[in-house]
Amino acid sequence: MFIFLLLPVMGIAYIGWHVWTLVPLPAVWRVSIIMAGVLSFLMIFLNFRRAIDDMPLPLARLVYDIGNSSVFILLYLVVIFLVLDLGRLLHLVRPQWMHQNFPLTACIVIGMFALFLYGNVHYHHKVREELHLTTDKPLARPLRIVMLSDLHLGYHNPRKELARWVDLINAENPDVVLIAGDVIDMSMRPLVEENMAEEMRRLEAPVYACLGNHEYYSSEPLAEQFYRDARIQLLRDTCLVVGDLCIMGRDDRTNLRRRSVDELARMADHTKYTILLDHQPYHLEEAEQAGVDFQLSGHTHRGQVWPISWITDAVYECSFGAHQRGKTRYYISSGIGIWGGKFRIGTRSEYVVATLE
């Protein structure tokens, strides 16, 4: 935990030093810029401590967006200054360029603005991913299944955004909708005040979901109540036969006493096409060993922005996209929503439209 607090502090100090030496403004303005950056970053702790729940909703949204966005801005400023310092060590960047340089300051400001404007626009573009699944098990007819994960409904993804997603899903005329956890972000307050459960009830197909880690962060009992109000069938360490499907929902990894995949699989009807919903894509071999036909997971967001995507690719066997082990198919979704700042850089927001035949 200490290292996760130390790294941002080191990053802020590193950026602050470069801003102080680079920006060609009077000292009072440079101090103001540095302090504004520090205060913006500190706002993220108001989010974690739920202090924003006591603020008026528009102000709470603003504090959430500023605090969480500052993390990504901090990351990219560190990357930029590291590249410049490396260039200086390699004698590709002249030392005097890093002092009181208006053209370089302007280039960084304009470049950062353009990058994050792109990231925000790209986030709002939802990619429709098609997936073709086949089975030897009997089906009355081909099935259309819409799959998604990581909605993160809350201060930054309000009801208006959810309404657009519901329209996208309904337009597919699915037989069933599957959600692999993290429907809720960090707080139940904006979902309740905006009555987002009512919006979810506009989905025209039956909806089945498992819990994610953020349902635990937001208060697990309240999250379960939201699922009921939204008419989402929560599968928590249980399975359910739905026509020609047997859908298994595993509790999130946060619950250390959850059932194993093998235990769930023993409860399942394997004459049906079996689908496992498991929010965090660890130990994918367990689904293969248990004879599961398909697993849907999320959680990774594929890092949300580059170069964090490199970290998720290294941590998980598959951090994004279609995957296969033996006869078991997988899809690890990068999520239709997102946590924190609404930016996608080098990753994408998506929903999956699967045809099973």
Image: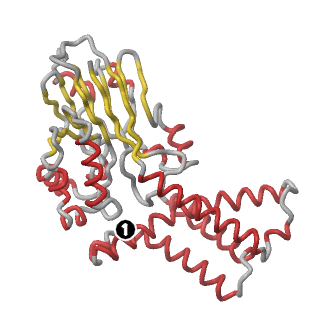
**Which residue is rendered at x = 44% and y = 52% of the image?**
123
For this view, does 103 lie left or right of residue 324? right
Residue at disc 1, secondary structure = helix
Question: Picture coordinates of residue 263 (x, y %)?
Answer: 22, 26
- Residue 107 is left or right of residue 174, and the answer is right
Q: Which residue is mark 1?
A: 47
Extreme residue toward the top, this view: 136
- Image quadrant containing the C terminus: top left
Residue 143 in the image: above or below residue 206: above
The image shows residue 155 at horizontal and vertical percentages of 32, 65
Please tell me which residue is depicted at 42% across the width and 67% down the height of the picture: 65
Q: Which quadrant of the view contains residue 271?
A: top left
Q: Quadrant of residue 27?
A: bottom right
- Name the quadrant containing residue 145: top left
Instruction: Pinpoint residue 262: horizontal percent, then vertical percent.
Output: 26, 24
Where 122 falls versus 322 (above or below)? below
In the image, what residue type sits under mark 1? Asn
Task: Name the side, left or right, on which 195 lies relative to 307.
Answer: left
Q: How many numbered markers are drawn?
A: 1
The vertical placement of 174 against 106, above or below, is above
Residue at 29 percent across and 77 percent down: it is: 55
Question: At which x and y percent is residue 226?
Answer: 16, 54
Judge by depth and name the residue closer to the eye, 21 or 353.
Answer: 353
